[in-house]
Amino acid sequence: MNIKANTEFLNIKETYLFSEVGKRLRVYTEANPGKRLIRMGIGDVTRPLPQIVTDALCKAAMEMGNAETFRGYPPESGYGFLRESIVRYYARSGITLSPDDIFVSDGAKSDIGNLPDILGDNEVIIPDPVYPVYVDSNLMNGRRIRFIEGNIENGFLPLPDGIKEPSVIYLCSPNNPTGAVYDRNGLKAWVDCALETGSLILFDAAYEAFITDDLPKSIYEIEGADKCAIEVCSFSKFAGFTGLRCGWTVVPKGLMAGEVDLWKLWFRRQSTKFNGVSYPVQRAAEAALSDEGIKKCLENVSYYRNNASLLADVFASKGIRFTGGKNSPYIWLECPGGMGSWDFFDFLLNEVQIAGTPGEGFGRCGEGFFRLTGFGSLEDTKEAAERLKKLL
Amino acid sequence: MNIKANTEFLNIKETYLFSEVGKRLRVYTEANPGKRLIRMGIGDVTRPLPQIVTDALCKAAMEMGNAETFRGYPPESGYGFLRESIVRYYARSGITLSPDDIFVSDGAKSDIGNLPDILGDNEVIIPDPVYPVYVDSNLMNGRRIRFIEGNIENGFLPLPDGIKEPSVIYLCSPNNPTGAVYDRNGLKAWVDCALETGSLILFDAAYEAFITDDLPKSIYEIEGADKCAIEVCSFSKFAGFTGLRCGWTVVPKGLMAGEVDLWKLWFRRQSTKFNGVSYPVQRAAEAALSDEGIKKCLENVSYYRNNASLLADVFASKGIRFTGGKNSPYIWLECPGGMGSWDFFDFLLNEVQIAGTPGEGFGRCGEGFFRLTGFGSLEDTKEAAERLKKLL
């Protein structure tokens, strides 16, 4: 065909990270059939869904099989029952939202990827290391990206620096991949910068449920954020919904970009290019946000967080610098002895049969760092901690 | 904020169609509490899901509650079991596809809305009257749209006319809103035009299951279509999944726009901005595509189609010109006596308490036409047919 494709896609570099990781693991396990590999690179939940959630799924499925209770197209922004449950969930953190501010979606990744649809050609500011979707979804739209550096000195929590023009600023806290969490002063610095420069913050709160210390779970805990921030959140990590697919985005009603109402643009985008979330999944999400559901879901979150802390203790005892390991399922460590990310990957694999993720896969600033996660089983994590203690 | 919004959104006109319809119905029913209104404007399925489908949903929900069978992130393009079921479904129409050609999604509307993401600035050709998503999703990207006229003379099945430059061509057959269905010669004319001009056809097959006559259910029944067409299809109408959310898009592997591989672009788009379809929903879709599932789903399709034919018989007996009424849930009729769409709406409402959809809501060429659907109950449809017989 002779039609024009969107050639901006050609500016996106293929990420070989996970395929290269997979390849090296295959090669090793084939060469060493006797050795037991422990996978600590997992970025996905592994615990089963609480029964209160699966019961809600089944009940809704049965409703769909009955003429009296069958439901067709869902509301594009989500059923009222779920949007109200989400509003109540925010109220637990002292945040007041209206159901109108909530847009239920099939997951945070979709919303993060689609939000650039409603934005013009602004400078985009993204911390490095980073969840690659922030970068790629903007490159697809031909946006100008400026990376700001996360490093061991700023604890991988960069603060506003040299931002003059109105920009679109991506923040993720608790952070993937570093596990670092902004405190109120840190987020306040960003909100103040956004208000001063007329910038928009896109805040990714997907890991908020892992926070146990007194740290902000939502950007809306910071005064003024409702005038400058959109927040994306998810049931994936909190409730183990990575396989069920449900998340939400908060666009405060009346959030204006100049004369343009971004709430109306997002509503128009979603009602034109999206058709709502599966009814049984919305009922499952509602169940996860019930008092009993939250209790059960947080038991799984604690399980992962405890795994992460077991690994953190090892690195702390060895004087290896890291972020995360608390308020997060992730541990982000400095490769010992100045090793490169891939050298350390091979080192851990060959010496103690532990698989992790090389930090350079998350951006230039990830070079020399390494990510381990608490999403494995407690047994494997304990075994991995023992092996690391001996090795390091 | 001073950031720039995507101002292309401001070029999209608000559609007041369904809100205006709703308003007039409210006003009438409040003024006439005694009269029984029959709603024949429904564009959504109403029959419950077959038990084989709801059982599959429940079974998958239970798997998600069990540590041994829990599943996390689904593959972005869909599970192999479902993509293979879809390939077998096409094989029933004599079409050979590979599972690699299939991208499972949360619905045809999402795919139709998102496909412009991978395309450049081409002229977009859209038949009028039209499903508004084709128009709005292109206006959001600032594309140039040329409408081609559907009318009573061409049976609302316009053929290629004056297309010189490589273009993106939207086709929907069976058509929403007109119910008209292209025969092989008609689709061949479009495929030949696309091959000659280097154009891309975006074919919307969402209503294919309604076809009983010997008419093409897929663009890929036409030779050469695999070199110039992307097809979007859905479980919504075939299996009643409007509330469950599942569809698919076929991008033949190696479909090239100049030097650019559109399959790779769509894969990249989906793997970056989408995270796959809910596992229980994919199991439900697999069940709908089993031999027993297809049989049960087609019973519902026949129910709607039979309703549409009851209405078609009335208009045929009155010498009122229409399209659809077979191979489709829709009937698209010429308003009698040269009435305007809204005049006829008010006429039906006031005289026989039947609610439909004014054709002008689907584009300029819809003025003077009216859409009724077979998605209501058999009882209501029979009653409506009787009322129309007396009135017209």
Image: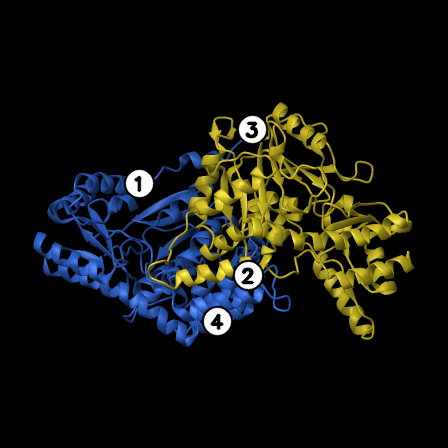
Chain colours: A yellow, B blue
Q: Are marks 3 and 1 in contact (CB under 8 Å)?
A: no
Mark 3 residue type: Lys
Q: Residues within 10 Å of mark 1 (few under 14, many from 20)?
A: few
Secondary structure type for disc 4: helix
The reply, left or right, for residue A381 in relation to residue A389 is left
- How far apart are the two marked residues, 3 and 2, measured between alpha carbons? 37 Å
Q: Residues within 10 Å of mark 3 (few under 14, many from 20)?
A: many
Decide if residue B301 is in sight here: yes
The location of residue B88, given as percent across then percent down, is 46, 74
Secondary structure type for disc 1: helix
Residue identified by numbered label 3: A227
- Label 3 or label 2, whichever lies nearer to me, is 3
Mark 2 residue type: Ser
Q: Residue, x 54% and y 52% (percent of image)?
A: A246
The reply, left or right, for residue B69 in relation to residue A352 is left
Q: Residues within 10 Å of mark 2 (few under 14, many from 20)?
A: many
**Residue B261 to residue A201: above or below:** below
In the picture, the quarter occupied by the C terminus of chain A is bottom right
Say which of A86 and B274 sits in front: A86
The reply, left or right, for residue A239 in relation to residue A153 is left
Q: Which residue is most to the left?
A: B390
Q: Are marks 4 and 2 in contact (CB under 8 Å)?
A: no
Residue identified by numbered label 1: B19
Say which of B176 and B161 sits in front: B176
Residue identified by numbered label 2: B77
The reply, left or right, for residue B227 in relation to residue B307 is right
Residue identified by numbered label 4: B85
Q: Residue, x 62% and y 62% (percent of image)?
A: A48
Secondary structure type for disc 2: loop
- Label 4 or label 3, whichever lies nearer to me, is 3
